Image: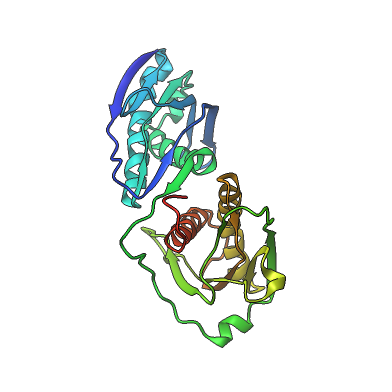
Amino acid sequence: MKVFGEIATDLNYFKTIRFEKEYFERYVISKQTGPDFVVDFELRILPAKKDTITVYWIEDGPTKQCIQYIFEGIGKFVGFKNRSSIGVDPFDIVISNAIIHPVDFKPARHVTYTCSRLNEIAFEIGTKLVKHNSEPLRLNEADSNNTALTSLTSYYDILLPNRKMERIKLPSGYRCYKKFEIEKSYGETPFIIFSATNNNIDFRNINRLEISFAQNVNGISSFLSLIDGLTKIVNDIYESGYDLGGLKICILDSNLKGRAPEFSEHMYWFLKELLVHNNEVDFL
């Protein structure tokens, strides 16, 4: 095993991702119609031994052919998170046993899909922390109207056990509005507008996170795009030793015509930042 290269990483972020456990997989993605490509290699993520992101590799012919592009994809992942104001703590990653299909070998695909897969792994298994920031949390305000609220006819609940631990919640009567947008270089920019509020006013709702949305293509697509992030933040807060107070999420508007999982991570980070700023905790 040899060092292929190191990637410097900035630690001066209020939101960070950290790999604390070893993780291994064989990553394979391919397309067999149109412009064909195959990306196929093993990766192992380990807690860092240095203060940089260190890329190791186990040398063989196929891995030698693609390691440079995998390395670039790892760097692209770090830059992608930094542009979203999220830091990536140092970690080690070992690349090995690549398989190359000579006709379908596309260097740019190795860059793109390495970046994409690391982003998915980081969201799934990485420890995600938001530190308390003295600067005010910036919100994109969206207008609430009775028409939007009365059109929300579908509901989904996530139960919130009360274990008599310190409770993380929004202030009584608090409501905020947020518009999420995902930049696209082509076509219409997808967006979701939602409101978040505590639901402790109604004692029956104190131990649940309620999601309401319209029973149409846009509402259902938005719900499916956000549910993973909402489930993950509930699990992470409980694993951190806190209880979560009742929350209500109303999906007011969107232009989605299908599931867009990118929104889950945006919802996760926004809600965690919102809860940190409204509770006396140093980080969450």
Q: Residue visible at 52% across and 30% down?
A: 27
Vertical position of residue 3 compared to residue 147: above or below? above
Considering every residue shown, the one lying at the far bottom of the view is 146
Colour pattern: rainbow
| Residue 22 locus on image (x, y percent) | 51, 26
Q: Please identify the quarter of the rendering in which residue 229 is found.
A: bottom right
Q: Across the whole image, how many numbered discs are drawn on residues? A: 0
Which one is in front, 47 or 83? Answer: 47
Which one is in front, 74 or 156? Answer: 156
| Residue 68 locus on image (x, y percent) | 33, 26
Which one is in front, 31 or 41? Answer: 41
The N terminus lies in which quarter of the figure?
Answer: top left
In the shown orientation, is residue 122 left or right of residue 158?
left
Q: Residue visible at 45% across and 58% down?
A: 280
| Residue 209 locus on image (x, y percent) | 64, 63
Vertical position of residue 112 compared to residue 153: above or below? above
| Residue 227 locus on image (x, y percent) | 60, 57
Q: Please identify the quarter of the rendering in which residue 205 is found.
A: bottom right
Vertical position of residue 16 compared to residue 8: above or below? below
Q: Residue visible at 52% across and 55% down?
A: 264
